[in-house]
């Protein structure tokens, strides 16, 4: 039987509003892809827009930005903290994405 571990997921701005909480502990049985983690986090909040919002947000794993990495290939280890951040307004332009 595989040992169960946790990945801490932290939500900011629109993701926090969609989830109705600032964070979740997602149970995993080992390393998981970012795409699987997003789906598991969204499943904790059925009937919300969380899956749509998470897909539009930037992601940090630990303190490292995921950037343009493929979520289906990006592996997250148990014990990690993953943060979902909306596009930031300001600077030369602002986001018009309604998801975040």
Image: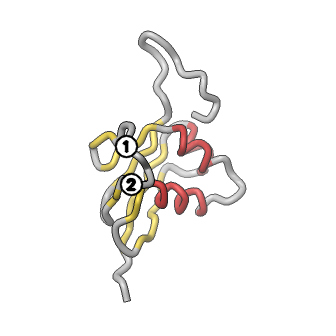
Count of numbered tags: 2
Residue that mark 1 sits on:
69
User: Residue visible at 60% across and 50% down?
Assistant: 51
Residue 24 % position (x, y) = 48, 59
Query: In which quadrant is the N terminus drawn?
Result: bottom left
User: Residue visible at 64% across and 30% down?
Assistant: 98
Residue 57 % position (x, y) = 49, 38
Residues at discs 1 and 2 in contact (Cβ within 8 Å): yes
Asked if residue 15 is positioned above or below residue 26 in the image, the reply reads above
User: Residue visible at 28% across and 42% down?
Assistant: 64
State left or right for residue 53 relative to residue 25: right
The residues bearing labels 1 and 2 have C-alpha atoms spaced at a distance of: 8 Å
Residue 20 % position (x, y) = 60, 50
| Helix, strand or loop under label 1 | loop
Which image quadrant for residue 65?
Answer: top left
Residue that mark 2 sits on:
73
Which image quadrant for residue 58?
Answer: top left
Q: Residue furthest left?
A: 63
Query: In which quadrant is the C terminus drawn?
Result: top right
């Amino acid at each position: 039987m595989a040992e169960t571990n946790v990945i801490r997921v932290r939500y900011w701005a629109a993701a926090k509003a969609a989830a109705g909480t600032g964070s979740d502990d997602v149970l995993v049985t080992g390393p998981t892809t970012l795409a699987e983690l997003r789906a598991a986090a969204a499943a904790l909040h059925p009937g919300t827009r969380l899956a749509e919002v998470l897909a539009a947000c930037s992601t940090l794993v630990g303190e490292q930005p995921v950037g343009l990495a493929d979520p289906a290939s990006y592996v997250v280890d148990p014990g990690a903290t993953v943060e979902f951040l909306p596009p930031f307004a300001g600077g030369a332009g602002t986001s018009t994405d309604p998801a975040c």
